[in-house]
Each structure stands twice: as C-alpha cells, then as structure tokens.
Image (tube, rainbow, N blue to C red):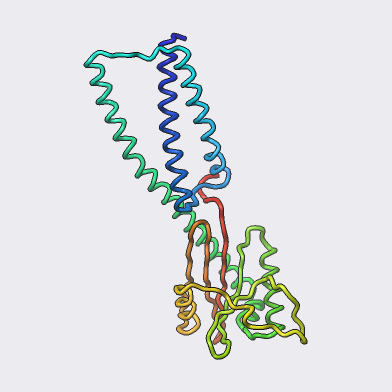
Amino acid sequence: MNPKRLVRLSNIIGIISIVLLVYWVFTFIIIEVFGLKVFRENITQTFYMSVLGILALMVGALIINIMFNLTRIAQKHNQDEQVTNKGKKVGWVLLLSFPILLLFLFGGDYMTSKKKERLLVETAKSIIESNTKKNEHLANYSFNVNWIVATKDILEILSKTDDNFPHVSIIVKDSIDSEPVFLGFTSYYHGKLSDTIQPIKKTFITKTTQSERIYLNSVFEDENGEYRYSSHDGRYELFYPFFKGQNRIVIYFTEYQRYGKIGS
C-alpha cells in the first residue's frame, strides 16, 4: 500500500477512535452519575469492553504514523482554508450530537422504568386474580401467630414460583401505644413463633418516607385505590392496594436491576 495512503488511513482511524472514545466516556459518565438503566446485560458488557478495542485502534494508528512519519507539514493556503471550514462544520455536528445522545440515554432509562412498571403491575394483578383464598387471608389482617405464619408461607410460595419474581411484602396499618404505624410482613422472619412465643409489633415496623406515608394514609384512611410506582438508580418500587370489603392491605414490590431493557 502507498505509504501516503497508509498514513491517511491511520489518521482517519485515529480521529474516529478519538471521537468514539469521547462518546464512550460521555455516555459512561452520564449512566454512572444519573444511575441510568438503558441496555440489557449483554449489550452493557459489550459496551464497557469496547473501550479496549477503541484504545487498540488509537495505539495502532499512532504507531503507524510514527513509523512512516509522513504527515504533511504544510498545505496550500486555499486548501488549508477548505480544511478549516470543513473542520468547523464537523465540530458543530459533533457538538450537536451530544444533546441527542443525552436524550437517547434518558429516553432509554425512561423506557426501562415504564417496562418495569408494567411488569410489576401485571404481577400484582396476577397475584390478586389467581389466588382468591390466599388474598382473603391476606386482607383479613389480624396481628397474631396464625396470620403471620400463614402470610409468610404464602409469600414464600409466590417468591419461589418464578426466578424473576420481585421481592414482595404486605403492608398494613396498625397502632402501637395508640400511635399509628405501618407494619410490613415478608417471607422472611428471623426467629420462632408459636402459641407460647407471641410476636412483637415493633419488630414488624416498616420504614417509610414522608411521601410514602402520605400515600399509605390515603389508602387506609381515604380508600385510595391508585397504585404508587417509583424508580431510582435501578431500584423499582410498587405499592399496590387491595381491598376486600372493609379490609385493606398494600402489596409492596421492590426490585433492583443492574441493567436496562433495550437490546436483545
């Protein structure tokens, strides 16, 4: 191959590699800083490993330029002006592409969040529609050993049905020393319960934020039947109220996901 063409090709490869590396670093920073979940696991891993390939291209192009040392030192005045004008256009194109990439990343994270919301809501509906007797038990809350043990067994069976089943708990409203509290019951309980070993309410108190308490109070006090969904940094939460006559509970789903939903 003509050395001049080889140097020109290496320059093109080097420039493309630098641009790709800038995009990669920009994308990586945005994803890590904002905790965006955009791509599926295989695409995410491939994306992270691609930096090695980009660096290899840059090093190879640099070595070729050093070996041949044929970079042009000077150009004619009119040619330089054409190159400068062309460079400005390319610079503007690259600059404008970053907001587009930013929109794509946040859009991908939004799509991941909406897809997770749909899946969690469908899971909640399937639990309510396909487990009538179990739902009656859950809704008929009473703080005693029988209800707690049976609830633990129900949630344990549900969690073992599907490998991808999210963490689920039951939230009820109760009181301790005349003070209202929200209690949470899961498939895990560290300790033993029996007729002689009675449960203690304070061990079941579930921590909530101010906004969550406002929502839960609207469910238990004002019969708000709307679910509450939130997502942040790969953590997805769904509060799904269930009413059975005068009895009310909230099915609470939580799931953490390292990767997004875009891709194959």
Give the percent coordinates (x, y) of residue 1.
47, 9
Left or right, residue 25 beside residue 152: left
Q: Quadrant of residue 150?
A: bottom right
Above or below for 5 versus 150? above
Classify residue 88 as left or right of residue 6: left
> Which residue is most to the top?
2
Q: So how many labels did they put on this image?
A: 0
Question: Which residue: 55% across, 44% down?
Answer: 264
Residue displayed at 44% across by 9% down: 2
- Name the residue: 52% across, 75% down: 241
Position of residue 50 measured from the top left corner of the image (x, y, whole percent): 53, 35
Q: Is residue 41 above or below residue 169?
A: above
Residue 97 in the image: above or below residue 203: above
Q: Quadrant of residue 184?
A: bottom right
Q: Position of residue 17 (x, y in %)?
A: 45, 29
Give percent across and percent down for residue 104.
Answer: 41, 46
- The residue lying at 60 percent from left, 81 percent from top is 139
Of all residues, the one furthest to the bottom in this rendering is 178
